Each structure stands twice: as C-alpha cells, then as structure tokens.
Image (cartoon, helix red, strand yellow):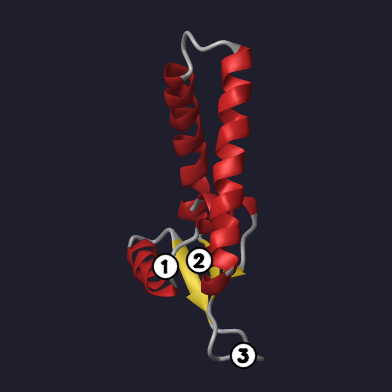
Amino acid sequence: MMVLWEKDGLTQIEIAEKLFKDKTNIARMALNLEQKGFIRRISPENDRRSLLVYLTKEGQQLRSEIIPMAEKINDLFIQGISDDELNEMKRILSKICSNLTESFRR
C-alpha cells in the first residue's frame, strides 16, 4: 500500500522490484488487497499480460489512518536515541540496502 501511496498505477512487477519481493508474493498480496477493496487491478489495452494496480477510494483513505499510527510507533522506537546515533543507523542501513540491491542485480 505504501508503494502505491507514493505512486499509484504501478505494475505488479514494479511493485515487486521496489519491495524486493517475488512476483508470486506480490500477486497474492494484490489479490488479498483487491478482495478487501483497497486496490483494483486493470489490464492495460496495450499489454494484456501485465496488470496495473490502483488504489480505490478506501485504499487512499486508509493512508490517513495508517501514517499517523506508523509515525507514533516510529517516535516510540527512537525515544532516547540521539540524532548522531540515528544518523549512524541510517548510514549503516543505507549500506545494507546498497548491498542487497547489488546482490539482486547479479
């Protein structure tokens, strides 16, 4: 959902790449979200093999409920951690992400 909140109308393959998940898992997740009414999947006219994923009104509204909760949880997680410590953690996590990205490209 967060990927679609950033950019709506992605293909399932694009979502899989952004989340480092395989296409089968994304297809299952999409089916589940579609059944719950949060997204809809549409085959574009020019490519019947791919599916574009769009948020429904309910999926868009969910953002206003989820983001504030996530922010509160993040605030709890970083309580008592200095800005320098957070910056160091971000630097290390960035390196880990780079390593993972390189690993998937091979």
Query: Dot 3 corresponds to which residue?
Result: 47
* Residue type indicated by callout 2: Ala
Cβ–Cβ under 8 Å for marks 1 and 3: no
**Towards the viewer: 82 or 69:** 82
> Going by the image, does 39 lie left or right of 35?
right
Is residue 54 at least partly visible in the picture? Answer: no
Say which quarter of the image contains residue 103: bottom right
Say which quarter of the image contains residue 3: bottom right
Image: 32 above or below 77: below
Instruction: Look at 37% across and 64% down and name the residue there.
Output: 29
Query: Dot 2 corresponds to which residue?
Result: 16
Q: Earlier in the sequence, mark 1 or mark 2?
A: 2
Mark pair 2, 3: CA separation: 18 Å
Q: Earlier in the sequence, mark 1 or mark 3?
A: 1
Query: Dot 1 corresponds to which residue?
Result: 26
Which element is circle 1 on? Answer: helix
* Residue type indicated by callout 3: Asp
x and y percentages locating residue 23 in the rendered image: 44, 73
Image quarter hosting the C terminus: bottom right
Image: 32 above or below 92: below
